[in-house]
Image: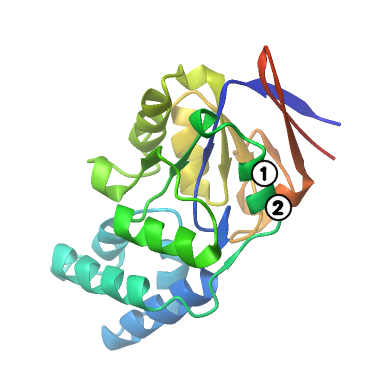
Amino acid sequence: MPTFLCQAILFDLDGVLVDSTPCVTRIWSEWARKHGLDPEHVVHAAHGQRTIETVRKVAPNLDAQREADQIEQQEVDDTEGLQVLPGAGELLAALPPARYAVVTSGTRRLATRRLQVAGLPVPSAMITADDVTRGKPDPEPYLAGARLLGFAPGQCLVFEDAPSGIRSAKAAGMIAIGVPTTYQAEELTEANTIVPSLQAVVVTVSPRGLNVAWG
């Protein structure tokens, strides 16, 4: 059984703790059609990065901030189909609150809403789009998460479902564990390893830190 020893765990939110794919697909597809864009391409691009960065990438002619604000409001309002992913609740319950954080490309308002709807605790430690100037794949979000918890980047392990998030974590000097929920495993090859889901992960707290294993 593969095992990693770390001092803290950083979780991406969407695609790792909660399944928001129905909401994301519905809202971004509608937005793409409204602006004459390919919905499939836009939805694929939207995962794993801040909304404003997706807008800038797929529609550079639009007012990115205005569009991002409108999309975010829709995401806050539309939670149909949103649910907790297998194993997420149990894994968070096994962790000391001071040893984990959520690091998400969504805003704090959106992240809080999705955690509440999914029935997961809203952690005291959370880095959102509101807290950084450069989103994933830049290392800034995960470096901020480590700093918030008070641990060195090399002492942190990250669970991520998106290539941009994996690149962010590795650029920050962290172990990145891929979860193939949003993307196929072959798209997550930059991760140090891949687990089928959080349901397969077991964390044991010891005097040395957190022993993270799966099988």
Residue 187 position, x and y percent, is 61, 52
> According to the image, label 1 marks what residue?
91
Residue at the image position 73 percent from the left and 45 percent from the top: 195
In the rendered image, the vertical position of residue 192 relative to residue 162, given as above or below: above
Is residue 40 visible to us here? no
- Which residue sits at x=52%, y=48%? 163
Rounded to the nearest whole Å, what is the CA distance between mark 2 and mark 1?
Answer: 6 Å
Q: Where is residue 199 shown, x and y percent of the image?
A: 75, 50
In the rendered view, would you say 208 is above or below 90? above
Q: Is residue 8 left or right of residue 24?
A: right
- The amino acid type found where label 1 is placed reads Leu
Q: Residues within 10 Å of mark 2 (few under 14, many from 20)?
A: some
Mark 1 crowd level (few <14, some 14–19, many ≥20, 10 Å Cα): some
Q: Would residue 18 be found to the left or right of residue 39 on screen? A: right
User: In this figure, which residue is indicated by the disc labeled 2?
Assistant: 87
| Front-lying residue, 123 or 191 | 123
